[in-house]
Image (cartoon, rainbow, N blue to C red):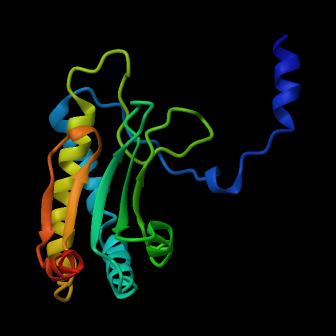
Amino acid sequence: MRRFLQSCLRGIRKPDAVLSDAPRPPYLEDEAAYRAFLASVLDGQSDEVLRKLHAAVDRLPQKARGLHIVVHLGQEEDGSFWVQMHVVGPDLHVLNDAIKGYANLFEGRASTIETAIANVPQFDPFNVPFDVSAAIAEESSSWMEHVWCRASLPDLSVPVCLVSDDGYGGAVILARDLSRIGAAHAH
């Protein structure tokens, strides 16, 4: 049986995107160590996220009523998550299409599958001594607030809100100009 499985696997080639020899992130069961490692991974992506923020803001459609930066927690509860921008306003598809190439700010993969490259800390899903989703939401939100402040973006004419899925972390207002919202409701 073993030789049969080996012969089957010989013909399978891993996709180019996952052929990296990068070391896999460690398994961490201590909350402070998990948060510190996650913060260092996020900090390493700050320059790329700054570039995407500037590009997206430059492309915000005139009809935009707001910009939401959302920490989406993975449904598998394996520690995977995404930080994405969403334009708010009429005809969401058209509005979000304008920033499509810049909307995905960060993708945190904690997959333990051999063909996936994990880039965030992993943990034993059957023995988690702390709320991983809360740690992800809080660290990601703190990081995005810091990156937003570093961005020194021009005054936006739309409010910008940072939120997390499933009620983790609450909402943080990053920019408050409500002029377009007020104008929209005046008609």
Q: Quadrant of the N terminus?
A: top right
Q: Is residue 42 above or below residue 135?
A: below
Q: Foreground residue, 163 or 26? A: 163
Position of residue 128 measured from the top left corner of the image (x, y, whole percent): 28, 21
Position of residue 2 measured from the top left corner of the image (x, y, whole percent): 81, 14
In this rendering, position of residue 166 left or right of residue 9: left
Q: Which of the 4 quarters of the picture holds residue 53?
A: bottom left
- Furthest toward the top, the residue is 1
Residue at horizontal 41 percent and vertical 31 percent from the top: 78
Q: How many marks?
A: 0
Q: Is residue 166 above or below residue 105?
A: above
Q: Foreground residue, 75 or 123? A: 75
Position of residue 74 measured from the top left corner of the image (x, y, whole percent): 41, 39
Q: Foreground residue, 41 or 167? A: 167
Q: Which of the 4 quarters of the picture holds residue 50?
A: bottom left
Q: Which of the 4 quarters of the picture holds residue 183?
A: bottom left
Q: Is residue 34 something that shows in the picture?
A: no
